[in-house]
Amino acid sequence: LRQIACQSRPQGTGEELSPSAVLRGALQTWLAPRAFRQLNAAVAILMVLLGVISATGSLSSSADSDWSTKVQVRVESEQWIDPADGLLTYQTLTLQTRETHTGAPLAELNNAVSSLESTDAQNSLSSRLLDELAAAESPVRARQIGDLLWRTWCFHQNPEAAAMLAEGTRLLDQGDFVGAEMRFLKALALEPTYAEAWNKLATVDYLQGQYEKSLKEIEQTLAFVPRHFGALSGKGLVMLKLERFGEAAEAFRQAQEVSPASEGFGLDAEYAEAMQREMVEAGVVAD
C-alpha cells in the first residue's frame, strides 16, 4: 500500500497531500488497472448470474422443509467502466426472474449469520436474506431481516478489513468523519471488493456534503450488491440534495422493491415525486 500510495502522489508539485487523499489515490491506482478495468459487461452479467445460481443452490436443500414458499424475485444489475475516472459504474437492468424459497424461522437465519466463515458464504447468505426481505409480509419481519442483512454485509473473512470497518463505523457514530474515512479507506485498500466499506465511505462523504463523490461510492456498492437497500436509499438521498428529484424517486422505488414491506421507502419516493412535480410546474425542469 505504501508503494502504491507513493506512486499516486503528484510529481514535482511540492503539494502535501492529506493521509486520506493519499489512500484514495492509492486505492484508485490499485482498482483501475487490476480489477475493474478487466470487467466488461459480459463478465459483470456472468458474475451476477453466478450469484443467482449460488443463492438458488444454497436454498435448494431446504426445498422440502415446512417453511418453503415459492416467490418471484427480480435480479437487476449492469456494470461498465467509466472512461473518465476508471471507476465501475452501476445501472439497473432486469436480467431474469427466478424462483426461490422463503419463510425460514428467524432463529435459523440468525444462526446462519452467526456462523459465517467466508466471503463466498456471505454472498450466498446475502442473496438468501434479500429473497426473504422481498417476501416479508410485515414491517416487523422486514426490519428483522434487514438487521440480519446489515450484519451479513459487515462480515468479511479478512479480520483486519472487518476490524477497520467496525472501528470506522464507531468513529462515524461519534461524528469523527476524518477518522472514519481513514478506516474505511484502509479496509478498501485491503479488500477493494468490500461492498459495505464502499457504502460506509459513501455515508461519510454524504454527511460532509461531498455528494458527487458519495454517488460514485454508492455505485461501487451497488456493483457488488445490486439489491443493497441501504445504498439505493442513500442514492435517493444524494439525488434529493442534488435536486434531481426524478432520479431520487426512482432510487427510493428500487429500495422499496427490494423491501416491499418497509414503509419508509415509499414515503421517501412520494416526497421526491411531489418535489419533481413542483419543479415541472414551475418550469424549472421538463416532465
Image (tube, rainbow, N blue to C red):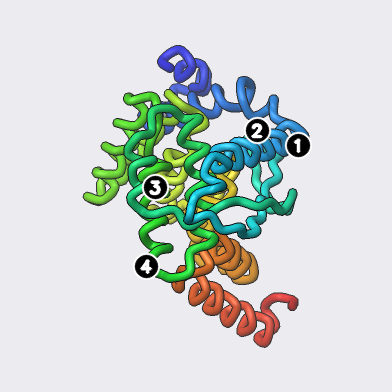
| CA distance for labels 3 and 2 | 38 Å
Three-letter residue code for mark 1: Ala
Residue at 50 percent of width and 65 percent of height: 241
Three-letter residue code for mark 3: Leu
Select label 1 or label 3 by which is in front: 3
Residue at 42 percent of width and 38 percent of height: 197
Left or right of residue 215, residue 50 in this image: right
Residue at which label 1 appears: 41
| Chain-order first, disc 4 or disc 3 | 3
Residue at 66 percent of width and 34 percent of height: 50
Residue at which label 3 appears: 109
Residue at which label 4 appears: 140
Select label 3 or label 2 by which is in front: 3
Select label 4 or label 3 by which is in front: 3
Residue at which label 2 appears: 86
Local crowd size for mark 4, using a 10 Å CA cut-off: few (<14), some (14–19), many (≥20): few
Local crowd size for mark 1, using a 10 Å CA cut-off: few (<14), some (14–19), many (≥20): few
| CA distance for labels 4 and 1 | 38 Å
| Chain-order first, disc 2 or disc 1 | 1
Select label 2 or label 1 by which is in front: 1
- Does 271 sit above or below residue 128? below
Local crowd size for mark 3, using a 10 Å CA cut-off: few (<14), some (14–19), many (≥20): some
| CA distance for labels 2 and 1 | 14 Å
| Chain-order first, disc 4 or disc 1 | 1
Q: Are marks 4 and 3 in contact (CB under 8 Å)?
A: no
Select label 2 or label 4 by which is in front: 4
- SS at mark 3? helix
Q: Are marks 1 and 3 in contact (CB under 8 Å)?
A: no
- SS at mark 2? loop
- SS at mark 1? helix
Three-letter residue code for mark 2: Gly
